Image (cartoon, rainbow, N blue to C red):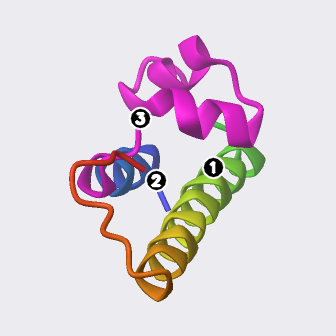
Amino acid sequence: MTSNDLRAKRAAAGIPGQAVCQVSGIPRAKLSDIERGYTLATPGELRRIDAAIEQILQTRQGLTKLAEDAGMALTGIRL
């Protein structure tokens, strides 16, 4: 997976870069530089970014399911 692929994946999911940074431990400026192609990411950094995006997506799905099970709607809430 390339940095462009990860940027597209994150953007399509509506995940803020700051959230990815908090989960992956990669500084915001570094993620920005990687996504814009200003610096090359190591394979480990690419894996950490991808894993962070996947973790956020799984958490979002879990929260949505919990809300549905409780009869609540998450409409208008940004997860």
Tell me, for residue 55, which label it has, or none. Answer: none
User: Is 45 positioned to the left or the right of 41 in the image?
Assistant: right
* Distance from Cα at disc 1 to Cα at disc 3: 17 Å
Vertically, is 67 above or below 79? below
Q: Tag 3 or tag 1, which sits nearer the N-term?
A: 3
Please tell me which residue is depicted at 43% across the width and 52% down the height of the picture: 6
Mark 3 lies on residue: 16
Quick one: label 2, few (<14), some, or many (20+) residues within 10 Å?
some
Mark 1 lies on residue: 46
Q: Secondary structure at mark 2?
A: loop
Residue 45 belongs to magenta span: no
Please tell me which residue is depicted at 40% across the width and 27% down the height of the picture: 37
Q: Tag 1 or tag 2, which sits nearer the N-term?
A: 2
Q: Position of residue 9 (x, y in %)?
A: 35, 57
The amino acid on which the numbered mark 1 sits, given as a three-letter code, is Leu
Q: Tag 3 or tag 2, which sits nearer the N-term?
A: 2
Q: Main secondary structure of the magenta part?
A: helix
Q: Which residues are magenta?
A: 11-40
Mark 2 lies on residue: 2
Vertically, is 71 above or below 64? below
Q: Position of residue 63 (x, y in %)?
A: 54, 68
User: Residue lying furthest bottom in this view?
Assistant: 69
Looking at the picture, tell me which residue is in the foreground, 55 or 71: 71
The reply to whether callout 2 and callout 1 are in contact (CB within 8 Å) is yes
Looking at the picture, tell me which residue is in the foreground, 14 or 70: 70
Please tell me which residue is depicted at 72% across the width and 41% down the height of the picture: 24
The amino acid on which the numbered mark 3 sits, given as a three-letter code, is Pro
Q: Secondary structure at mark 1?
A: helix
Q: Position of residue 62 (x, y in %)?
A: 57, 76
Q: Secondary structure at mark 3?
A: loop
